[in-house]
Every structure is written in structure tokens, then in C-alpha cells.
Amino acid sequence: MDFVLPQLVAGLSVGSILLLAAIGLSLTFGQMGVINMAHGEFIMVGAYTAFVTQGVLGHAGLSLLVSIPVAFVVGGALGLVLEQTLIRHMYHRPLDTLLATFGVGLILQQVARDLFGAPAVDVQTPSWLRGSVEILGTAVPWSRIFILGLVILVVAGLSALLAYTSLGRRIRATVLNRDLAETSGISTRRTDRLTFFVGSGLAGIAGVTVTLIGSTSPTIGQSYIVDAFLVVVAGGIGKIKGAVIAAFSLGLLQAFIEYSTTASIAKFLVLVIVVAFLQFRPQGLFSVRTRSLA
Amino acid sequence: MTATIETTTPERQRTTVTTRRRAGLAPGVPRTKGTMVGLILLGLGLAVLAPALMTDFQLGQLGRFICYAMVAVGIGLAWGRGGMLTLGQGVFFGLGAYVMAMHMQLADAGFAGEDAPQFMRNFGASLPWWWEPFRSELFTLVAILLLPAMLAFALGFSVFKRKVKGAYFAILNQALVAAFVVLLVGQQTTLNGSNGLSGFQSWFGLSLYDPANRRLLYYVAVAVLLVMVLIAFWIMRSRFGELLVATRDSEERVRFLGYDPALIKTITFVIAAVMASVAGALFVPIVGIISPAEIGVVPSIAFVIGVAIGGRATLFGPVIGALAVAWAESSLAQTFPSGWSYFQGLLLILVIALLPGGVASVVHYLRNYRSYLRFNRNRRSS
Amino acid sequence: MGDHLKRHHIALRAGTAVAAVTSLLALSACGARVGEETSAASESCVDVSGDSIKIGFINSLSGTMAISETTVNDVLHLAADEINEAGGVNGYELEVVEEDGASEPATFAERSQRLIAQECVAAVFGGWTSASRQAMLPVFEGNNSLLFYPTQYEGLEASDNIFYTGATTNQQIIPALDYLLEEEEVESLYLVGSDYVFPRTANMIIKQWADENDVEILGEDYTPLGSTDFTTIANQISRSGADAVFNTLNGDSNVAFFRQYNSLGLSAETMPVISVSIAEEEVDGIGASNLEGQLTSWNYYQTLDTPENEAFVEAFQEEYGASRVTSDVMQSAYNSLYLWKAMVEEADSFAVDDIRDVADGISFDAPEGTVTIDGETQHVTKTPRIGRINADGLIDTIWEGELTEPDPFLETYSWADEEEAEEFAEEAGEGDDADEGSDD
């Protein structure tokens, strides 16, 4: 049984990355019903933001901390532009937004290629995140602890925003009943814009954390998008709680299956298990009674 | 669920002429005369003109595009008429292709006097039991039709029974493709992993090195495509086709009228899956290879792109769109690899945002605005 | 409604007629059965009447493999320009026709067909992945044309229509193992690789070799291509306490792997990683800081101290910029053009059969040292070299083996016989879990 603890840690690590990639989607897809296939590319933009910030500041530790808010703003701004120019004309055609934003993703990938080249760029890990710490006889890398902490902060912040601020109340009202919200004097357009800004900004933050783990190249968004959507769908629509549980469940599932088989088989099994789960429970883990989704 | 809820699909929220046009609904049902002319033109173009004007190489390329067009016909039915965005056609395309490829591998090994394909012998592996039935030509042909049908039915029925919405369905499909590719790549000793199956000598006893046979294959593909278009036409004209569109536009009402929308959707999904599978089965002898790279998440989206650009809800739109996009990709992407990405992205955005009916809808507007109005009057009075 | 139905039937009939006519057309065009002589045996259409000769380059200039393959394309152009400046091949000037393989095997097959049948090139240079080579192989065999394939690969192949100028397993994998056994004195290994044919074949060979040399294999793991999570694998490696890691990961997965490996406090001193897919070109993207001190196994490094290499690196950097690096596969591609030139001039002909006849023993003073073609397998001799990655991202040679004859089917290695292979395949089929090395 000495493998349980390391795999628990591994599962939490995988889950925290998944959750960061998916939490923005749970806003834009979960709350608004927009399938934004360019979400993966927003993650990629966040990663390159970290790279550029590091180039400007030169100090890995400082630039990591600086690039988190910067990537949030950059990702958010991109989302805002996308919402204003394209998505707002297509709220009544959710499936079509999927294809149109896939086109946006293609363009963003090519822009990254033209600006930074196709090969991966190297984003340095700050010295205080290298190495690991012994917890109960298991080596836990500092970078993973940092990411886990960041995820907890992001989830707490987002939950607080939804629960206690006027913006959060407006978002929830719009999700539950758009027309009624409109007649109650809420500007649903403004709410939409803000929701999209926050959701895309979170993708930017996810991008920064991704640089701590793997490579930074124009196509990294592709490797997260399918999993991120699955997390949102499996968690249930419009519930942050659902996304959190789904992400960590998938992470742990992946880690424990991988321990006894190989990464390839684990990946396959996890996907199949989720698809099978959704066959029997299409509304996901948690469902809100809402008619916002087509 | 209370019955007072008006669950129109977003596509049709307002019912003025202008929104209909915005939603790109070409006349709902293809007209007989136009279809006949279209079929004959398509047949002439592909079966007479193309072989006369093209080199063997270009004809082989066109054969590949025709396979994509077959997938497009199915997507046109499922998505354009039925509102189900099938982002996972790669699974069915791959099923048909791998079944055909396994049969061809076994046949080639048989002619060479071996009992297992070369790649297995490289790994010192023996033939797995589930390869055995594919020695039979009949079993192979049946499997190409039945396997995807069963899988699509299993997937579709339970999902549609539970009233899963379009977006979910699309994402489920996409996840399935991702899983399928991971599975295939892992099958190194049984399906040659990421290299896929290739190096075929023969197709049902015909040598693939003979240009005459390659031409024959091309004609077979054209004939199959025409038959598929005919089937699609027949479905669109039938009562079932009307129900399908009704289900797309207002599933609840169809249910209240005593029909089972889940069954209607499932049947259509199965038809689309079988079409994709047949396309895959013909792709293998025409192109000479099937590998996981041809059926991943991105190729599956690419199948849909052609349909979207051509005109999803029309009869010929998906076919023409698929052929055009495939042709553009193979010629433009070669010349301007970076420009092509921009072009493809922009084209997709513009067509989807401004012209959801695809290019077919433009042709239609230009052709006869009056008949368009008359058609709408008829629709309203019926 | 009746009228409408009638029309409907007419349409169906008409449509059926159209389809039927097409099918008839199809069946009338039936060609040769298997085993018969085809009616149109592919006659080569290479045009030697002018003063120039066409050759084809096929590399992925777009898609996921473009990163690697564009460098090969660069070096092929460099070689062609050099040859033209020196008076061409047998007096003919080279005329290059380029095709993009777009990182898709099917595209490689299609485009190579075009190069041979439409452009009538005398030879084709390129391809990188095994999938692309296997997709092209039937095309070249069917047309009896020539492909020069530059990448180190998993062996088990020797086509009459392909010249393999990269290393096969006994020139890269086995020397790396010998080095680990002799110099590092390893007693146990952990295998990690991407999930595709090269790692799986390499690991199959490694397991047979380990069985023979009493080296324990403590684990064998495959990750999907492009995978970025190595938490579990790094944990298992760390806990296994293996003496070294044999790494066949491809591309960007290496970044994630080495980061995770480093963060667990593993290092080149305690548990070196020997990689066979990381060359100078990849080091930059992975980050030299993540890789410093780790080992690689290749036949060529940019730092090699030979006059030929000095000239090669200088010419390349002059053409493409001083920041560019050269790597093993690039060098093999560069050699392939010169080897083809030497064969054509020896045969005094561009015909494929004539070239094949003179191939055996043709050699070229390459940057890596003199390489000689083995006519039987159409591979070349290679000198295995183990390198250590330094802080500048270049690789220093730390060990050099004997000049090795190619042996793609490992026929000269007693432990790699078929029965053993079958045994291993059966074990592999049980699931890819790490098997305990049997101690018999």
C-alpha cells in the first residue's frame, strides 16, 4: 500500500491542472452555453505571456508572480474581443460558436507560430519552485504545491465572486432566467461580457501554470481542450463545485490506473469511463434546474 | 419540466422571413427536378469529365476527396437536417477503414504464403483471434456496415433517450474520438500503432499496382457517393425526413405528437455513421494507408468544416463543400503553409457567422428570390 | 400529393439510372488480378535528355513534425546548392522539386506518388517518422523509384527502393546499452517512451539484451504522444532506484519528463537518463538547464572535431544564421544527397537498377566520418557515439564505439533470435506492465 500516497499526490497534481484549464470553461460554457473551442488557445496565450514577461523582467521568480495577473488580463482581453466581435451574434446558435471559435483557435495558433516560431520555447522555473519537499515519506515537488495552492485561491475567489458580489448575483440571475433578469433591470449584455472576461482570464492563468510543468509551444492548447470540456460536462453545468470534484476525480482516476498499467492505457480508460458515466447521467454530477442551455 | 415551456431551438427563435434567411434554411426539401439535374451533373462531372481531363495522380486525389464527401453526406443528414453536431465521425470512418485494411492485410499475407502481416512478424507476434474472421470477404463487408451501426446505436440511443442536448453530444463524440486514437496507437503489435496499416498489394483479388484497377476503384467511389446522395434525397423527401427536421426545430412538439424523437435521431445518427464507415473502407484501397493520424479530433472537425462551408441543410451543399475544402487544402496548404491556417480560420469564422446556410444558400438567394418568398408563403400556410 | 409522389419516383429512377451507369463504367474497367503482370508496368519517366535532372524533397513543412523536418529540408537545399556549384551530378544540374508531407502519412504517400509519376524525379529525399516511411514504401516499390531516408529508426526493414542513411538499432540503441554496461556499470534500467513504433521496438530489443546481460528492467512505460504529465512515471522511476533511465520519449514530452524528474531531486550523477531522440535541435526547446549532464546516443554531434564537420557547420550557419545548430538527422540527410551523387557517377546512369547494382561499397567522407553503403541492406556504416549535454545546449562526445556495419534485423546478435522475440511479444501482449527480469 505504499503506493497510495504518492499516487494521491500525483492525482491531485493532475487534477489541479485539469481544474485550472476547465474552470474558465465552466463559466463560459457552463454559465453561458457558449462552446469556445479557442479556450485551449487562450491557455496557450497565457503560457506565451509568461514567456514574454520572463524575457522582459529576466528574473524567473518575480516574472512568474507578475505574469499571473498579466496573463489574466491578456486572456480576459482576448475573450472580451472575441465576445464582442463574434460570439454575441451567435448566442442563439451554440453549436455554431463551436466551429467559429475553432477557426479562431487555428488563427491564434498560427499567430503564435509566426511570432515565436513553431518549436517550443523555454520558460524557466524559478529556483524556489525547483526540488521537492518530503511529506510523509513522499517527495512532493514545490511546483505542484504552488499550482495546487493557486487552484485553491482561484476557486475560492471565483466562488466568493459568484456568491457575494453584485456581479456574481447578476451572473447567476442571467444564467437562471435571462429574460427575467433583463426585465429586473440587469444589463445581461454587460454581464455576458464580464463573464467572458473572467472565464477567458482564468484560461490565461492556467497557461502560466502550464509552463511550470511542460513545454510552451503553439499547439499546447490542443492537449487540454478535450479534457477540459469533459470536466465541465461531467461536473454538471453551472456549478463550480461540480467542476472541482470532476477534475480531481479524473486526476485521481488517471493516476491510479496509470500506476497499475501505462499512461496510454490510463488515458484511454479515463476517457471511456467519463463517456460511459455521461451516458447514464447526462446532466453530470450536479445539475442546476436551468433552461439556459440549448 | 412544465409543458408551458416553449423550447424552441435557438436556431429558430424568431419566425420572420429575415431570421429564417439568417439561419440559412434553404428550401426545406430538395426539389425533384433540381435534384435530378444535380445528380446527373455530379455524375457527369465525376465519372466522365474528371477521368477524361485528369492524370492518374489527380484522379487518386479526387478519389480521396470523394471519400470525404461521403462522410459529409452523412453529416449533412445528422447535423444539417437533424441538428446533431457529429464531431466524432473519425471513429466510424476509422472503424470502416481498419476493417477493410485488416482484410486486405490478411489477403496480401495469404498471397505471399504468410499467415500474419509483416509488422506482426517483426514483433514476433502471432495473429490475434479477432483478426481471423476478417479473412472472409463477406464478413468484412458486413462488418463495415454493421460495426459502426451497432456502435452508433449504442451511443445514440441512450444519450438521446435522456434528452442530451446538442453541445453535450458534440463533446461526448469528441472525447470518444480522442479515446479511440489513444487506443489505436497503443495497439502496436495488433494494428501497427501510430504507423497504421499500409502497403497493400490487392483489393478483393485485384492488383492495386495496375492503374486500370485504381481507375475502377475511383468509379466505385463515385457510384457509392451518388447512391449516398440518392439515399439522402430519399430520406429528405420522406415522412421520416420531415420528422427529423421537426425534431431539430422543436423536439418537445414532436414528442407531444406521439413520435419518439430519440429513435428518429438515433436512426439518423446510425445512417451517418454507416456512411462514414463506408467512406473509410473505400479510403483504404484508394489512398493505400490508414493510420490514427487520419481520424483524430482535428480530422473529425475537418469533416464538419466542409459541410458547414458547403451548406449543411442542403442536399448537394455538403458534397460540394467537402470536395472544395479538401481540394483547397491540398493545393493551397502546399503552397502557403502558414497562410492556409489564417485562410481556413477566417473562412470558417466568416461562413459560420455571416452565412450559416453555407455557400449553397448564396446560390439559392441569387437564383430566384421570388420562389423563395413563395416557398415561405407555402410553409406558413401549410 | 399524387403528382408530387410521381415526380419523386421519377427522380429516384433517374438517380438509380445514373448510379447504375457509373457502376457499369466501373466494372468495365477491371484490371489485372493479383499475381498477373500488370498491363502498364511502371516505366520510369525520368528525363535525361537535357542538362539538368530533377530530384524531389519531401518533408513536413506544416503540421506537428514541421519543427524537425524543416531543418532537414534546409540541409537538403544546402547540399543541392553545393553540388550544383561543384558542377552537378555526372554533369547534370540538380533541379529540386519540393513537396510538403504536412505531418500526415497519407499525404506523404500521395505526394511521393506525385513526385515520381508527374514530376518524374530521379530520386526522392526525405521523410522522418516511421509512419511516413511506411506510407511511402509501397509507392516507391510499386514505381521502382528511390527514396533516401535520413532518420535513425527501429530497423526490421530493408526495402530495395529505400536507402537508409540514418542509424539502425545496432548503431544507436545497442551501443548505448553497451556503454551503460561497460562504462556506467548499470545493473538495472527503467524504460520510458512515447507510444509509437520506435520506442516499442527499441524497448523490445533492450529487454532481450538485458535478459542476456543480466540487467534488470525495473519498469517500462509508454505515454501518449504529446503527453505532459509525468508525475506517476517520475514517482515510479524514483522509487525503482534504477541505475539509469533509457528514454525514447519524443518531442515536447521530454520537457515535462525532465522537469518532473529534476524536481524529485533525481540527477545525472545519481540516475543518468540516456536519450535517443534528443539532438541539438531539441535541446533548446527542452531547455539546456533541464538537461545538463544527461546522456544521448547518436552518430554525429555538432561539436565533432573533423575537417569535414567544420566545413559543414560553417556552410550551414553561413546559409541559415549563426544561431542555428546541426544535428544527426540533418547530417544524415546531407550525406544522402552526396551518396546518391557518388552512386550515380559510379553507375554512370540515373536508372534505379543500375544504381542498386553499384551501391555496395560506395562511400562518402561525411562530417561524422567516412560512411559506406552496405549493398545488401542499403543501410550505411556508422560510428556510435555517446554524448553529454553541456550548459550551452551542445553535446560533447564522451565515448566512441567501433565503426559498425548496419544490421537492421539484428542477425549477428545471438540473443535477438526469433524464438526469443516471440516470447517477448507474448509477454508484451499481456499488458505493458513492467516484468521482473527473469533470473535464469
Image (cartoon, grey):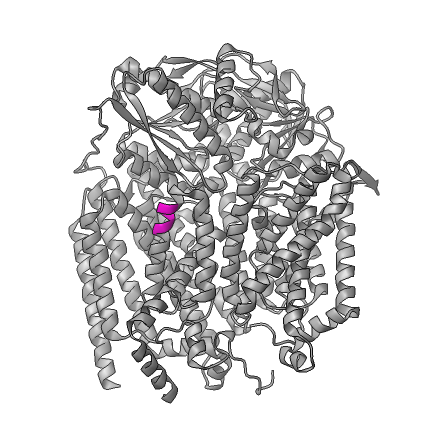
Nearer to me, C22 or A30: A30
Q: Which of the 4 image quarters holds residue C20? A: bottom left
Residue A99 shows up from this direction: yes
Task: State the image quarter where residue A60 is shown.
Answer: top right
Magenta span includes B330: yes
Q: Residue furthest bottom?
A: B381
- Seen in the picture, residue B71 relative to C96 is either above or below; the reply is below
From the top left corner, tell me how far across and down residue B55 is, in percent.
22, 43
Residue A184 position in % (x across, y down): 69, 82
From this viewpoint, is residue A22 visible?
A: no
Q: What's the residue at 39%, 19% (across, down)?
A: C82
Q: Main secondary structure of the magenta part?
A: helix
What's the residue at 34%, 72% (across, down)?
Answer: B365
Of C2 and C378, nearer the camera is C2
Apparent side of residue C303 relative to residue C338 in the rendered image (left or right): right
- How many callouts does the rendering have? 0
What is the magenta range? B327-332
**Above-or-below relation of C208 to B349:** above
Residue occupying the far top of the picture: C307
Examine the image and state in which quarter residue C223 appears: top right
Q: Is residue B326 left or right of residue C50?
A: right
How far from the left and from the top, in percent, is residue B291?
43, 45
Position of B291 with respect to B48 (left or right) is right
Residue A250 to residue A83: above or below: above
Q: Residue at x 66, y 82 (%)?
A: A183
Split into 4 quadrants, where in the image is the C terminus of chain C? top right
- Give the percent coordinates (x, y) of residue C361: 36, 12
Q: Quadrant of the N terminus of chain C?
A: bottom left
